[in-house]
Image (cartoon, helix red, strand yellow):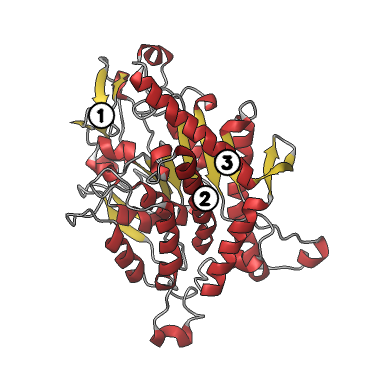
Amino acid sequence: MSQLEFMPSEGAGAGNEEKCADKPEEHMQNGYHFFIDPCEGPMPYIHSVEEPTVVESRDGDERQNGSMGLLQDDSKSRQEKQIERPKKACILSIDGGGMRGIIPAKVLCYVEGSLKKKSGNPDARIADYFDLVAGTSVGGLIATMLCADAGKGRPLFSAMEGLQLLEKKGKRIFKIPLLKRPVAKLRGILTPRYSVKNMEAILREHLVSEDGHELTLKDALKPLLIPCYDLLRASTYVFTRAYALASDSCNYRLIDICRATSAVPGFFRPATISSVDGKTNIVGIDGGLVMNNPTAAAVAHALHNDVDFPYVHSVEDVLVLSLGTGLFDCSYNADKVRRWGAFQWAKPIAKIVLDGISDMVDHSMSMAFSSHRANYIRIQVSKIPSRCLTEMDNSSTSNVRRLTKIADDMLNQPGLEHVPFGGKQQLEISNQKRLDAFVDLLIAERKSRVSSVTD
């Protein structure tokens, strides 16, 4: 079985024996030769093909696709591939965190400003220098804004415009109608705290092309990777442009993707969405519950996606910028928690789980890149006020200012880095200098691609 063949996810075929008796349907679309198994749910069940084909990627490069496995990992087929212009895949990953998304959004403003200054191009954008952008929850919204194409081949948003959208529209997204404010404390316990109407209206205002059609995953300038949790199949679902290009059954409106990845239980009702051809249905909730830090998934995607990244063989061939939204650093002694019950543990355990997931991914990535430390940096802020961590829906002007200041201060603070099996260590250089060094790597990679075209 090729590496893109997916075994049925748990629960995908449960109670659906008659449907699973159907034979897989063969398809050929956008150069992809694949089968979709009715038992498999939303993901294509791809079988290998004997003859290699050459397909054209969205970025315009011809790439040899041996056995049509998007994630094929055959060393022989790799050696037979055409020489590609890129030397390294540049990956951006953005954590989830509600209004704390202002922190990575502010960092991206600094990165984009540095790219403009050092490249001499005033129109430089994040999407010009990153080949894959992953994001969860609010990180997924930021990733979508930075990579969506309105039809001119340029991003819909600059980093600054994305930040301003979060700052200005946060109050509208996290708004409780005036008549319902007297019982506001009960909302979120007995019913979702917020209506999805405001969020969906904002997304419809912006995620459309100039001719008025709603943008889909296929309209992304660069490969996107955005997770949610699918209640129908009791499993994680990852939206990727690679699968969207392969089949309309894996292509979704960007509005729906943003809704699904940010549908935090208790805040918003689940997102009931369908693929553009109506063949795949998902009931999605917050991706942060299962993949708050999508860095590992993004790196794995680049390593095993031969269509978009045929030149990536190991972590040596990727550059990764991973942005966090703040860590829960509160400690407790035994005497304080020994008599705690479920009520007292409710808030701390949620933060511990979410931050623990993100931090463990960082630890794993640090081990994977231990021989190529310059290729991976994680920008994360610690010891921020607990109120910022617990009130992810606090869109007040004072909290926005507080988060903006935290992001600004973080740039001047010493960076933190995981030591494999040794915990974290504080670095001697600031986060700003780490970002400056990474921007230099991005520009050098960009220049190497231009030179390889002219040679």
Q: Residues within 10 Å of mark 2 (few under 14, many from 20)?
A: some
Query: How far from the left and from the top, in percent, is residue 381?
Result: 63, 53
Q: Residues within 10 Å of mark 3 (few under 14, many from 20)?
A: some
Looking at the image, tell me whether mark 2 or mark 1 is earlier in sequence order. Answer: 1
Which residue type does callout 2 highlight? Tyr
Q: Is residue 219 left or right of residue 147?
A: left
Where 99 sits versus 245, above or below? below
Circle 2 residue: 110
Mark number for residue 34?
1
Looking at the image, tell me whether mark 3 or mark 2 is earlier in sequence order. Answer: 2
Mark number for residue 203?
none
Q: CA distance from mark 2 to mark 1?
A: 42 Å
Q: Is residue 204 left or right of residue 386?
A: left
Quadrant where the C terminus sits is: top left
Per the image, label 2 sits on a secondary structure element best described as helix
Farthest right residue? 335
Residue in view at x 50 percent, y 68 percent: 393
Which residue type does callout 3 highlight? Asp
Q: Is residue 443 left or right of residue 56?
A: right
Q: Quadrant of residue 453?
A: top left
Which residue type does callout 1 highlight? Phe
Circle 3 residue: 436
